[in-house]
Amino acid sequence: MALRFKPVDSVFYELFSESAKRLVEGAGLLAEMLGDGCDREDVARRMRDAEHDSDETTHEIVRRVNSTFVTPFDREDIYSLASQLDDCMDFMEEAVDLTLLYEVDRLPSELGQSVDIIQRCADLTAESMPKLKGMKDLEAYWIEINRLENAGDKYYRRTVAKLFSGQYDALEVLKLKDIVDSLEHAIDAFEKVANIIEQIHVKES
């Protein structure tokens, strides 16, 4: 049997956990932006800062991969996981930015359900990321993320149907559809993170 030597350094696990914690922050800001009575300029500024911090963590992971001789698991999987975590934040930031730029006054109530799913996905991802080190107790995580993504698809279809029901004028529909799509992409990105973790788990177990 071939021996596999893994580094004792836990920096990759720490960086992935840090990246996932930033997603919880981003999901909270997204919920704040799509809620009532917030200072949208302030929320958008804080979201840009959070997205910048997320980018820095992603860049640090890539730098570590490029400068480390032995990595805890396949380099391509590290790149993929780091990139996909970053995509989760990017889509949340996009939804916040569009809400500000489009000056949307009336948001469909169904958006709250999508945001709830995003927040739950972020929480689960942050809770599960430290478990990568031991590769244990992760199956419930990707199963639940998959369930949440399916629920997100349902809410997405219903929200789009409402947009085209005649309750909104054409310009509102165009604006809101972009925001709804960003939320859907964020949920899909969280599922892709879970899929990558499942693949890593299969390889490493």
Image (cartoon, grey):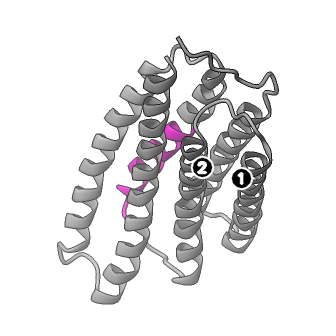
Q: Amino acid at mark 2?
A: Tyr
Q: Amino acid at mark 1?
A: Val
Seen at 41% across and 59% down, the residue is: 185
Residue 166: image quadrant is bottom left
Could you say which is closer to the camera, residue 50 or residue 196? 196
- As drawn, is 156 to the left or to the right of 164? right
54 part of magenta stretch = no
Dot 2 surroundings within 10 Å: few (below 14), some, or many (20 or more)? Answer: some
Q: Nearer the viewer, residue 189 or 203?
A: 203
> Does residue 103 appear in this view?
yes
**Lower position in the chain sequence, tag 1 or tag 2:** 1
Residue 124 image point, x, y percent:
54, 31
Q: Residue at x 60, y 55 (%)?
A: 86
Label for residue 79?
2
Q: Position of residue 202 (x, y in %)?
A: 43, 24
Q: Is residue 110 magenta?
A: yes
Instruction: State left or right for residue 197 relative to residue 14.
Output: left
User: Above or below — where is 174 with respect to 150?
Assistant: below
- Residue 62's label in the rendered image is 1
Taking the image as drawn, is residue 107 in sight? no
Q: Residue 175: image x %, image y %?
A: 40, 80
Q: Residue at x 42, y 50 (%)?
A: 187
- Does dot 1 land on a helix, a strand or a loop? helix
Residue with the most extreme top position: 1
- Determine the residue located farthest toward the bottom in the rendered image: 171
Q: Magenta residues?
A: 108-122
| Contact check, label 1 and label 2, Cβ < 8 Å | yes
The residue closer to the viewer here, 26 or 63, is 63
**Whole-percent x, y for residue 94 in the image:** 55, 69
Residue at disc 2, secondary structure: helix
